[in-house]
Image: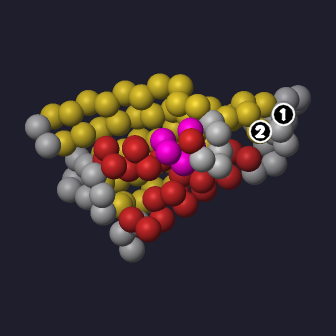
Amino acid sequence: MADFDVNISPREAIEIIDNEIVNKTVTGEKINEYVRQFDDKIIAVIVYEKHYLRAENRLTLTAVIDNLHGATHVHLVGGGGGQGLFNFDGGAAHDFEICAYAALFDYVVK
């Protein structure tokens, strides 16, 4: 799980994550995007999916992005796992989170 602020708008953050996950290195797909806007405030929940061979399963990445308290806040959580009794994913869910974080790294407020 990752929580951080960025110095770009929620829509820009969504576009950057989309580009990284759907069009670049991860080659995942966007399963759903839910966006609510109230005046200048936005909250978005986006779910991505990717098949990872080492996890022998499909993994998800959920991104919650909002600017409800000023700065754009990003919350990322990977999920899913391998098959079998323990559903161990070998770190693949965390790697999925890192892909989105890395795409936004230049905009992270430190």
Dominant secondary structure (helix, strand or loop) of the stretch shown in magenta: helix
Horizontal placement of 93 versus 39: left or right? right
Disc 1: which residue: 56
Q: What residue is shown at x 30% (from left), y 63% (from top)?
A: 7
Q: Is residue 15 visible?
A: yes
Q: At 47% from the left edge and 25% from the top edge, which residue is drawn?
A: 32
Q: Is mark 2 on a helix, strand or loop?
A: strand
- In the image: residue 1, left or right of residue 93: left
Whether residue 21 is situated above or below residue 74 in the rendered picture: above
Looking at the image, residue 15 lies above or below residue 56: below
Q: Is residue 6 above or below residue 22?
A: below
Q: Which of 108 and 15 is in front in this view?
A: 15
Residue occupying image coordinates x 65% and y 45%: 26
| Left or right: 4, with 26 as reference point | left
Q: Report which residue position mark 2 lands on.
A: 52
How far apart are labels 2 and 1 at the CA level?
6 Å
Residue 27 percent location from the top left of the image? 65, 39
**Residue 72 location in percent, x, y?**
30, 54
Query: Three-letter amino acid code at disc 2?
Result: Tyr
Q: To which quarter of the image does residue 57 belong?
A: top right
Kindly tell me whether residue 97 is visible in this rendering. no
Front position in the image: 108 or 28:
28
In the visual, does 63 lie left or right of 77?
Answer: left
Number of residues whose C-alpha sits closer than 10 Å to that of mark 1, classed few (under 14), some (14–19) or many (20 or more): some
**Going 39% across and 74% down the picture, which residue do you hit?**
110
Instruction: Tell whether label 1 touches label 2 (CB within 8 Å).
Output: yes
- Amino acid type at circle 1 is Glu
As drawn, the label of residue 70 is: none
The image quadrant of residue 22 is top right
Q: Give the range drawn in magenta.
A: 18-22
Asked if the magenta segment contains residue 100, the reply would be no
